[in-house]
Amino acid sequence: MILPLRLESVVYAAGGRAIIDGITLEIGAGPSTVILGANGAGKSVLMRLMHGLLAPTSGRISWRAPGAQAMVFQRPIMLRRSAFANVVYAVRLAKRQEPEKLAMDSLKEVGLEHLAHRPARVLSGGEQQRLALARAWALHPEVLFLDEPTASLDPAATREIETIIKAFDASGTKIVMATHNLGQARRLGDEVIYLHRGRVAERAPAEKFFAQPATAEAAAFIKGELPWT
């Protein structure tokens, strides 16, 4: 196992301000973790720091063998090739065996096998997001980071994506997902880390967080009293 993931006094600054402001945090294996907060709270930056796409300005992030992870973004990047070839490319890049078989199996898992040979860039937004999840599924990651994976999708596509996320969770993959969507956090989160202005304001089991928030900031956010930006 590669977890726990540890952040020690992590700061990330840009444009003269701290977007992530001294976060100390440990994330272990097991139940899904939702990073909740308003737009501008620092969720996306925190996800990129944990995934290794950004380096902290100061502080330390550590875990063993961080290669066994994948990340899906709000707007997935599609290569100029078929859906099938997009997955094959990811599998080959990870140096896995039987890339074609893994790719087709993964497309079946997300319900895209019938679109395997369609150009990825002509797929709908929901289909592209499912394709991004298929690429992740083919890698069998121990940790899957999801950064606002349904923010630009309609309710039907959102339900499809959430079903796939639950399948990852059921398969044993650790889910770490950032969202500002309270309903989604309730549906998918076992624990909630509430981020406010680049700091962890609260961390609690999801049921307790929504029923009895411990901070005024979290209580206001749940009631919809904080601005999104």
Image (tube, rainbow, N blue to C red):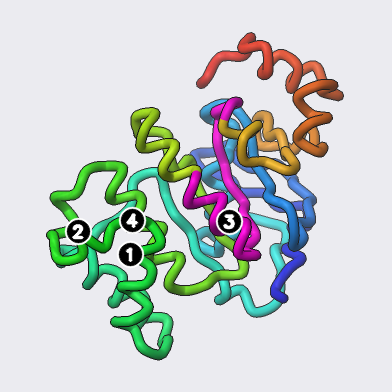
- Determine the residue positioned at 83% across, 30% down: 208
* Residue topped by disc 3: 49
Q: Amino acid at mark 2?
A: Leu
Q: Which numbered marker is on residue 107?
A: 1
* Residue topped by disc 2: 115
- Determine the residue positioned at 61% across, 12% down: 224
Q: Amino acid at mark 4?
A: Gly
In terms of image quadrants, where is residue 117? bottom left
Disc 4 on helix, strand or loop? loop
Residues tagged 2 and 1 counted as in contact (Cβ below 8 A): yes
Residues tagged 2 and 3 counted as in contact (Cβ below 8 A): no
Question: Horizontal and vertical percent for residue 56?
Answer: 62, 57
- Alpha carbon distance from label 2 to label 1: 9 Å
The answer to whether 29 is drawn above or below residue 151 in the figure is below
* Residue topped by disc 4: 111
Magenta region: 163-183
Question: Horizontal and vertical percent for residue 118?
Answer: 13, 60
- Determine the residue positioned at 34% across, 46% down: 75
- Alpha carbon distance from label 2 to label 3: 33 Å
